Each structure stands twice: as structure tokens, then as C-alpha cells.
Amino acid sequence: MRNMQPLTDTHRIVLESETDIQGWRDQARAMIQRGTEPGQLVWSVRNRAGMGELDFGEVTHQQARPANRPSSEIRIDRAFLQLINTALLHKNEDRFALAYRLLFRMQKTPKLYRNPADADVRKLQSYEKSVRRDIHKMHAFVRFRKVGTRGNREQFIAWFEPEHHIVEAVGPFFRNRFTGMDWIIASPDASIAWDGENLISGAGGCKQDFAQEDVIEEEWRSYYRNIFNPARLKTQAMKSEMPMKYWHNLPEAELIPSLVRQSGSQVQKMLDRETDISALTGQAVEEGHWTPDSLSELNKEMAVRTADYGDNFSVQAVLGEGRADCGIVVVGEQPGDQEDRRGRPFIGPAGELLDRALGDAAIDRKHLYLTNAVKRFKYVQHGKRRIHQTPSPADIKYYRWWLEQETKLIKPRIILALGATAVRALTGRSLSISRTRGAILPLAANRHLLVTVHPSYILRIPDAAGQDIEYDKLVRDLRKAAAFAATPDINGIMAEQWLKCLAFDL
């Protein structure tokens, strides 16, 4: 650190603008090198009078900004630098002092910014998080209005009111996305423009100076109206992701109240179309006129009679397992490689994930009945590896009668269908997983269907965040099935047995 005389009084640092991050870094570096205590500095911004701070006080110290900054002896982690660069765009005026105080303390504790228990760290991180959220909202909710053309380039303008000083920061995003048109995005405090060659920052403006509607507005509203899915409507989540303060700049927002009011009836119409009982319980392929008296008899006959069906199937049938007197049957697609080798369902990676989800849903696997729509592993041989093959509609149809007999003997209150193959085997139809997921659908007398995804689908999601989201949904679906099975209004005996099976207190 350079040997400089430390300052002994309180001094004022004036930055050029609210987004003068480089200026803050230059001044902070100089003050750190002088050993200036955070309490000796007052950070301000030139011409901040409009924000309640008059700018006529004496600047008792201002380190001149060097034209060519010398190499600094101060070293900080890149992650902390990124944290500062983002947090300094926050609207709170204490952000410059806060960042300097943390930087000053880190001269003695270099990894301090990683300590989540430190009050300064938590506050700076909260600033960064708020700014990033604001940037995300601006990316999503800017709506351009066409105002004319210049040569062969169309010209657009947009108005947005961010919470923080992010207008310049989002410029590269919009430049890369809308390179082929000229545009201006203005806010009360700043503006950014693109003319095909340069990204230009400027002063703020007034909303009244910008067009509020253009010729394609109605087309956009019509598009939004058509893509609106009432079955996926979650009003609180929608308001959280698209806060109402942004609505007045969104042409589609005027449709939202009426679409929300109509969503209930629209969902019911969708369910009515997709839950017609006669369609859901379409005829399965019958296996002669034989009717099994027990699961053991059914499984014994199935293992023999289906042994010669189709190519690329394992010779071993993997039978269902679990309690035959319980309220929930879980139906998957087909046995996997490990299930086939060990002769048990749901013991491979997908089965392990299902076990974890059952645990998080407070359901004991021993109190379920688990089986598959197709009873043998379908695969192709590649060297020493057996590669999974998805069952064809003909495969599903062939095994459907056996699955139907299985569920008739168990008499579950609800069947949990894991994935599209299970849904098709149980209903004879290809229902949309996304549109029917989580709904309790009537399947037959005293028997219902709940559709969810197969655990293998979650394992194939490439990013951890996406996996977490889908995993939480699976746990929620399991809990919903358990709660429905425990409802004591249609089958008192079965419900009582199921309540005894549950590992948690409903």
C-alpha cells in the first residue's frame, strides 16, 4: 500500500453521476491507500438536488481522478468486484459509503464478503439482489412502440420506470436483441438509444412525451389473449413476477383482470373436455374371458402369456410390488435396466429419486403399490450396454389389460400416473401432462387419477434449478395424492386403512 498521509477530518467525495462506478472505484482506491476511515468520508453525487440533497456544500477533499490510473496495490476478488458493480446501481444513497466501509474492512479480512452473517455483507448483497431483479424486470417488461422509419430502419421508443439506476446497464442487452432497428428507451432519470452503430446514454424524460400506443398494439393484445392459459394461472405468482406497478406500460395488462375473472369457467371447460369418463376408461384389449381372482394368479399368468410378445423386450417380467390393500397405486412407464436385472420396480436412479420424494412427502413406500404400464424392459443392445427404448402405442395397448386387472384387484382410491406412457395405459388417451398435472380426474367408480411427471424426466433436466423446481412439484403431487386417498368420505374402510399407513399426521 502506498505510504500516504491519512486524512484526519471528515471529507466529501462528489461523484459525477449516480452510475459513476469507475469514479467511486478511483476515489475508494485513493482513500484506502491513505488509510481513510469510512467515518471520515461523505459520498455524494453532483446535481443530486432533485433527490433532496443540495449540492452547494464545500468539497473539503476530492482526490483528482488520474487520466491513466496507476496500477493499484489493492487486490480484491473478482466476485466481490462484481458484487460492488451491481450493488452500486441501487437507489439508496448509502450504497457508496456501504461499499467503501466493506472494502475498508476487507483490507484486514480479505474474505469478509463471503461471510453471510456480517451485517454489511448482507446489506450489500440485498442491494445486488434487488438490482438484478430490477434488471430482469426491465428485460421482460419494456414494450416498444413504433414511431416511424429512417431509411430502411424502423424506429421505436419505449418508456420504463425502473427502481434503480439500471438504464445504462441494460443497454447491451437491448442492443444485442434489437440490433436491426433504431430505438430509444427512456426513464425519469436516464435514457439509452441505439442507432445501428452506437449505444448512446442520455438524460431522462417524461412519459407524456412518448407514444402510448401504436398500430400493432391490438395485434399484441390478440396474441396475448390467445396464449393465455387459464389452467396455469396463479394470480399471486403472476403478480409477484409481473408486479402491478409495471402494468400501466404493458398493452396486454388491460386484458388481465377479465382473463382472470373468466379463468375458472375456462379451466372447467378444459377439464370437462379432457375428463370425460367414457373416454378415460376406453376399452382395453381383453385377454380372453378369464378373470383373475388374486394378484398372484394374475402375475403368474401374465409372466407366462406375455413372454413371447414383441422384439427387444427382456424375457423377465417385472411385477408390481407393495401393499395390495392400500389407497394409492403408482404407475410408471416400464422397468429399467436395473429393475430388470433385479426383478423389482423403481430401484434404479429414477426409483431412488422417487424414494427421496416420497420421504419428503412423508409417505412410506411400503404402504404403496408400485407397478409399470409395460411389464418388461424394452431396449436395444449396444456392445455391453442395453439402451432404453420407449414403449410404442402398440406395446402400451398390449399390456393395458393386465394393468387394468391389477388395479381392479387392488381397488386404489387414486392412481398416480408418472408420465405420458402411464397416462396412456390408464386412460387409452394421450392427455397433455402440463394441462392435467395435479388435477384429480375421475377414472372409474371410486377410482381417480392424478397425473404427474416420471422421476426420470427430472433427472434429464440439465440445470439444477430446473430440477429443484420439478422435484418440488413432484413432492407436492405426492402429498396431494396422499391427502386425497385419506379423505374418508367415499370408502370408510379403505380410508381408515390408509390413514393407518400414513407416516404423517394429516
Image (tube, helix red, strand yellow):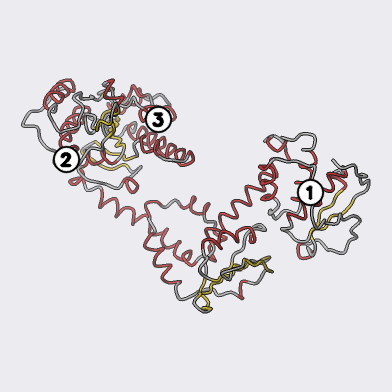
Relative side of 81 to 283, left or right: right
- Of labels 2 and 1, earlier in sequence is 1
Task: Say which element carries label 3.
Answer: helix
- Of labels 2 and 3, earlier in sequence is 3
Residue, disc 1: 97
Relative side of 131 to 282, left or right: right
Q: What is the x, y in percent for residue 235? A: 46, 53
Q: What is the x, y in percent for residue 306? A: 13, 28
Q: Nearer the viewer, residue 391 or 273?
A: 391
Relative side of 119 to 437, left or right: right
Disc nearest the viewer among 2 and 1: 2
Residue, disc 2: 394
Task: Say which element carries label 1.
Answer: helix
Image vertical order of residue 353 relative to residue 69, above or below? above
Q: What is the x, y in percent for residue 408? A: 19, 31
Residue, disc 3: 353
Q: What is the x, y in percent for residue 358? A: 39, 29
